[in-house]
Image (spheres, grey):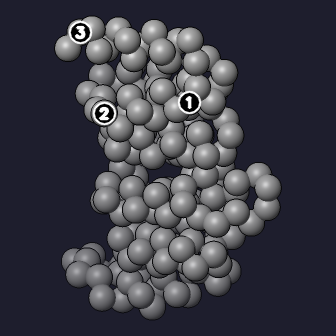
Amino acid sequence: MSRLHPLLLRRSSFSTSTSTSPDSRSWCPRAAFAVATERVRAGTLSPEEAHNLLDELLRHATPVPERSLRDFLVSLARAPDYDNRRSGPALAIALFNRVCREDAGALLAQPTVCTYNIIMDCCFRARRPDLGLALFGRLLRTGLKTNQITANTFLKCLCSAKRTDEAVDLLFHRMSDG
């Protein structure tokens, strides 16, 4: 993490780790995510540095507080466009997929319904509603309870995927259920 790593080490020096190894004292995932989140908001975090942050988290196998991960993903979802590919939301999707693909979820943070909502919205913002719909199916298979935000994001993805008839049918069905 070229520019990011030294900053993370300095920022995380306040860590209250009880371990005696120098490596564990120099690493604090909460501080790492805080620094990375601020850099995303400033538009100075590159995709490579974001992937390096994930590599570092996996290497240390330190659990990450769900809120830290959520704040980081939200900042990526709202990141300014660096090009016409909507790179912030696309990067959030890529990092989420990497976490799931590498079975690192237990090491970092188990995805919650809030995490799924953020990533589904990223799919919509990245103009990939098909991925948002697939992610909704995955969310249902996890057994997590959905909420109004999930339903709204799902409807946005359906409409964006030119499946408006299904969205209207679903909406009328939900309204008739009371």
Q: Position of residue 57 (x, y in %)?
A: 48, 61
Residue labelled with disc 3 = 177
Where residue 67 appears, x then y in whole percent?
A: 31, 59
For badge 3, the amino acid type reads Asp
Q: Amino acid at mark 1?
A: Cys
Position in image of residue 158 (x %, y %): 56, 23
Q: Count every numbered label the image shows and give the total.
A: 3
Which residue matches tag 1? 157
What residue is at 47 percent from the left and 28 percent from the top?
154
Q: Disc 3 to disc 2, how far (Cα)?
A: 15 Å
Q: Is residue 68 left or right of residue 9?
A: left
Q: Could you tell me how far apart the alpha carbons at marks 1 and 2 are, in whole angstroms?
A: 14 Å
Spot occupied by residue 106 in the image (x, y as percentages of width and height): 36, 44
Quadrant of the drawing holding the C terminus: top left
Residue under pointer 2? 148
The residue mark sitting in front, 3 or 1, is: 3
